[in-house]
Image: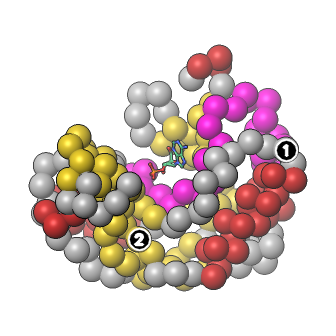
C-alpha cells in the first residue's frame, strides 16, 4: 500500500457454512461484482492506511477488548443498499439488531479513540457487503437470502489487499 502501510480494519469473519450458503445464493442473482465469499465479514471499525509499527498497539488494544466480550449469536436479516435501496451501489445483507454486537463495536471504537488510533468514525451500521454494483440500481433484482443464525466468536484484524481480497492478520477469541 501507499507509503509501505497496511490498509486495516477490524471485523467479525463469517463462519464457513454461512459463507458457503451466501456463495450459493450469489449464484442465483444477476451477474454483478460479488464479494469473494472467503472474505465476507461484518466490519466493526475501518482504520485505513496504517504503518506496520502500529500493529503492536492495535494488538494490545484488541486483545483487551476481546477479553471483555463473550461469544454471541447473530442472525442475518434482509438485503439493503448504500446509499439507498432504490439506487444501491453497495448491496449488503443486514443483521437482526444485536446489543452484543453494538456493545463490541462501541467498546472497540472507544478503545481505538482512547489510544489515539485513527478510524472511520461514521456511525456503526452492521452489514455484510455482498456485492458492489457497476450501475446503481434497485434491489428488486436480488432474491432475499434466508435468515441464517451464526455465532460471532472471534475479533479479527484484516488487511485489505491491493490486489483485492482481505487477509486476516490476527485473531482474538472473544473470551469473557
Ligand atoms: P463495505 O463493505 O460496506 O464497503 C474493507 O474495506 C471493509 O471496511 C469493507 O467491509 C468496507 O465496508 C469497510 N469500510 C468501512 N468504512 C470504510 C471506508 N471509509 N473505506 C473503505 N472501507 C470501509
Is 142 situated above or below 114?
below
The quarter in which the C terminus is drawn is bottom right
Q: Position of residue 43 (x, y in %)?
A: 55, 57
At a point 12% along the width and 55% down the height, the residue shown is 30
Please name the residue that numbered disc 2 is placed on.
94
Looking at the rendering, which quadrant does residue 54 occupy?
top right
Residues packed near mark 1 inside 10 Å, few (<14), some (14 to 19) or many (20 plus): few
Asked which secondary structure carries label 2, the reply is strand
**Magenta segment: does it hold 141?**
no
At a point 34% along the width and 60% down the height, the residue shown is 84
Image: magenta residue range: 38-60
At a point 87% along the width and 48% down the height, the residue shown is 115
Please name the residue that numbered disc 1 is placed on.
116
Q: Position of residue 127 (x, y in %)?
A: 46, 64
Q: Are marks 2 and 1 in contact (CB under 8 Å)?
A: no
Asked which secondary structure carries label 1, the reply is loop
Looking at the rendering, which quadrant does residue 40 occupy?
bottom left
**Magenta segment: does it hold 41?**
yes
Left/right placement of residue 20 relative to residue 52 reads left
Residue 93 visible in this rendered orientation of the protein:
yes
Residues packed near mark 2 inside 10 Å, few (<14), some (14 to 19) or many (20 plus): many
Q: Position of residue 52 (x, y in %)?
A: 73, 29
Q: Is mark 1 within 8 Å of ligand 1?
A: no
Residue 34 visible in this rendered orientation of the protein:
no
- Cα–Cα gap, marks 2 and 1: 30 Å
Q: Which mark is residue 85?
A: none
Amino acid at each position: 500500500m501507499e507509503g509501505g502501510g497496511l490498509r486495516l480494519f477490524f471485523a467479525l469473519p463469517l463462519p464457513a457454512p454461512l459463507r458457503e450458503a451466501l456463495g450459493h445464493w450469489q449464484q442465483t442473482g444477476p451477474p454483478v461484482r460479488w464479494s469473494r465469499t472467503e472474505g465476507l465479514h461484518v466490519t466493526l471499525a475501518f482504520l485505513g492506511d496504517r504503518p506496520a509499527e502500529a500493529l503492536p498497539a492495535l494488538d494490545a488494544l484488541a486483545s483487551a477488548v476481546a477479553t471483555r466480550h463473550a461469544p454471541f449469536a447473530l442472525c442475518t436479516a434482509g438485503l439493503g443498499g448504500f446509499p439507498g435501496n432504490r439506487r444501491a451501489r453497495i448491496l449488503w445483507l443486514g443483521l437482526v439488531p444485536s446489543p452484543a454486537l453494538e456493545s463490541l463495536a462501541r467498546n472497540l471504537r472507544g478503545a481505538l479513540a482512547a489510544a489515539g488510533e485513527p478510524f472511520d468514525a461514521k456511525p456503526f451500521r452492521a452489514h455484510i457487503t455482498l456485492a458492489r454494483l457497476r450501475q446503481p440500481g434497485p434491489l428488486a433484482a436480488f432474491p432475499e437470502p434466508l435468515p441464517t443464525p451464526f455465532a460471532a466468536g472471534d475479533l479479527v484484524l484484516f488487511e485489505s489487499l491491493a490486489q483485492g481480497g482481505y487477509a486476516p492478520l490476527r485473531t482474538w477469541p472473544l473470551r469473557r
